[in-house]
Amino acid sequence: MGLEDQILFFFSALGAFNGLFLSLYFAFIVKNKNRATYFLAALLFVISVRVIKSVFLTFYSDISSLFIQVGLTACFLIGPFLYLYTRIATKPESIGKWNWLIHIIPITIFMIVTGILYPYNDHWYLWQRGARGILGYMLLFQWTLYLIGAIYQVRFSFAKLFSKTEKPSNLDYWIINIVVGCFLIWLAYNTVRYTSYIVGALSFSFTLYVSLMIWFFKRRQHSLSFLSPPVKYQNKTISDSEIIAIADRLPYLFTEEKIHLDSDLKLLDVAKRLQTKQHTLSQYLNDTIGQSFSNFVNGYRVDSAIEMLQSNKVLTIEGIGNECGFKSNSSFYTAFKKHKGMTPAQFKKSL
């Protein structure tokens, strides 16, 4: 083994064990742990296991098939854990408590069955990018699909890098670096020949960079709360009777009494009409309907504006927006396009 190979082997092994350390840090040591930090720990763990498998397979070719199968399973799980982390980090309530298992359990079962029926030592060719390498191509397709999904989840964070009006937060910078690091690992694995070395070296750079980011942010704040946004109302619950009462009364206030036409309507005003607490109504809208109060109200205002655009021949578009409860033309146009995918002028032209 030449000097260049020795250096790459060193960085591969060091990257793997550095990743294992970081995964344990996020899983057991970091304060304010949440679902996002656990999935980040899992992501770093499977990357490390995948590299360890390659390093040992390269230098100990007679290693057991079980160990190799564990490494290949970890490789299949890199994409899912990256996707799950980015989704939960950006939208903490978008995945139910156990829904993430549908991304993990089928893969784990598939790899166990594959390991029993087609052990790597006897069927290594299935993992090559050749005519018979069906498992290798399956891995490429699955990993690529999840990587695209992860990039889509953080698209708004990337957009902020080039925005003149929005400034990226610490969370935005963090998840961008995580996704870019995983993309480089994916790129190395699928484009270079000596994948075990290169992926290991890149994972070392990736995990080392994560370590430096942790140190940098801890110098600026006392915790790593930026790893994911806080989950609203996580310590509060609404009783079933409260949910039923709000669900029965709330639509009536907007469809019949049309309280949304009041441009000064506030969450407290609606809560008083429902005879409930302000935070209870807010939690109901966020948890049950999946909308903030402003988005919920604007949805009714937009529906009213559509009715007037179809029937009113006197008022201008701006006048209709004002009649429907919008305080400014910009807020009217923004809400209309968000809910209907076009501006009020485009909608009126399409009639």
Image (cartoon, rainbow, N blue to C red):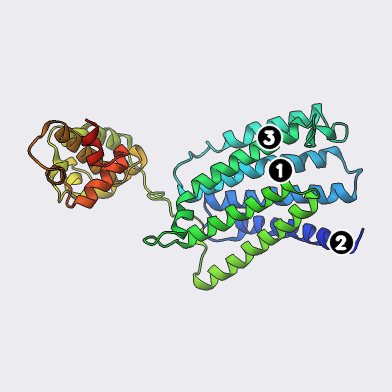
As helix, strand or loop, the secondary structure at mark 2 comes to helix
Q: Which residue is mark 3?
A: 108
Taking the image as shown, residue 283 lies to the left or right of residue 81, namely left
Disc 3 to disc 1, C-alpha distance: 11 Å
Tell me which amino acid carries mark 1: Cys
State which mark lies toward you, 1 or 2.
2
Tell me which amino acid carries mark 3: Thr
Q: Earlier in the sequence, mark 1 or mark 2?
A: 2
Q: Which residue is mark 2?
A: 6
As helix, strand or loop, the secondary structure at mark 3 comes to helix
Q: Nearer the viewer, residue 274 or 125?
A: 125
As helix, strand or loop, the secondary structure at mark 1 comes to helix
Examine the image and state in which quarter residue 13 appears.
bottom right
Question: Looking at the rendered structure, which numbered label has been put on residue 75?
Answer: 1
Q: Earlier in the sequence, mark 2 or mark 3?
A: 2
Q: Position of residue 329 (x, y in %)?
A: 19, 50
Residue shown at 59%/69% (left/top)? 215
